[in-house]
Amino acid sequence: MPPRLRAALSTVLLVLSCLLVPLGVVSTWAAYEIQDTDRYVATMAPLSSDPAVRAAVADAVTDSVVKEIDAGPLQSTVESFVRDAVRSFTGTAAFRTAWNAANRAAHAAVEQALENDSEGEVTIDLAPITQQVKRQLSEEGVPFADRIPVRHTEVTVMKAQDLSDYRKVFRMLQAAGLWLPVAAAVFAVGGILLAAHRRHAVLATALGTAAGAAALAAAVAVGRALTLDDLPPDVSRAAAGAVYDALTRTLWVTAWVLVGLGLLVAAGMWWLSHRRAGKLSVEPPRL
């Protein structure tokens, strides 16, 4: 192969490898953490202890319950009892069980909507939480507790107008899976093997990988800001931020690990190159 063609091919492969690094991380994350129901539920489980999430759930359940009850002059009293009961319930093991069940149902509903071209909005039912609160209020003798309509406690997870856009992205990531990171590794190896100066190629690949991973970390941060700015006024920003952070924690950690590894390898290659150059400069001339 002519040297110029070989150098050009090596450059193309290395550039493709660096570009595929962030995309490969995202596709793997989507396929093996977000798409997998058990992993998703495990990711969301710790949020049942997050104060902002507990407060948001308590407000959602309370508002949904109270608007269905007409207690007349006792309305404010009943609302106060319901709110206190819900907040108390969010600190129990039963709430953690109900939270996991709600997230499992939400994940299944979203996945079905994305796969089956559904046009309706996706909601999750907080009925298990409402049922527990209703039982607790009834046992405490709170007026009108028996009128709490368990069936109406629903929260919208994904709006109908968002489904078509998410569906396209979901299917692309689902198809990519592990192919993108594998392709990135193959391109990197091929580009390094074809390079005339392999140490320089490794150095460039390491820096390119670090840059791609840093871009991914920046995208996660920007996505968080845009997501929170786009929230309706009645949605808790603190709770939404906690959910976003939980879902993207793997992306964030992986991105910074790759940044660190890329910079470490680049520093090692730079040190080896300068060490070798230093040895050549002090080597006595041969007679």
Image (tube, helix red, strand yellow):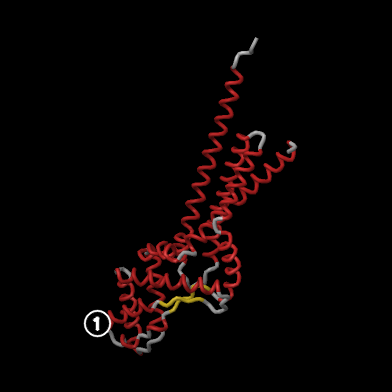
Quadrant in which the N terminus is drawn: top right
- Residue 272 lies in quadrant: top right
Residue 150 x %, y %:
37, 83
**Closer to us: 195 or 83:** 195
Residue assigned mark 1: 139
- Residue at the (58%, 54%) spot, across then down: 180
Residue 27 against residue 266 in the figure, above or below? below
Q: Residues within 10 Å of mark 1 (few under 14, many from 20)?
A: few
- Residue 153 lies in quadrant: bottom left
Q: Residue furthest top?
A: 287
- Residue 165 lies in quadrant: bottom right
Whether residue 117 sits left or right of residue 52 in the image: it is right
Residue 117 x %, y %:
58, 75
Element on which disc 1 rests: helix
Whether residue 249 sits left or right of residue 188 in the image: it is left
Quadrant in which the C terminus is drawn: top right
What's the residue type where badge 1 is placed?
Answer: Glu
Residue 136 x %, y %:
27, 79
Residue 206 x %, y %:
57, 41
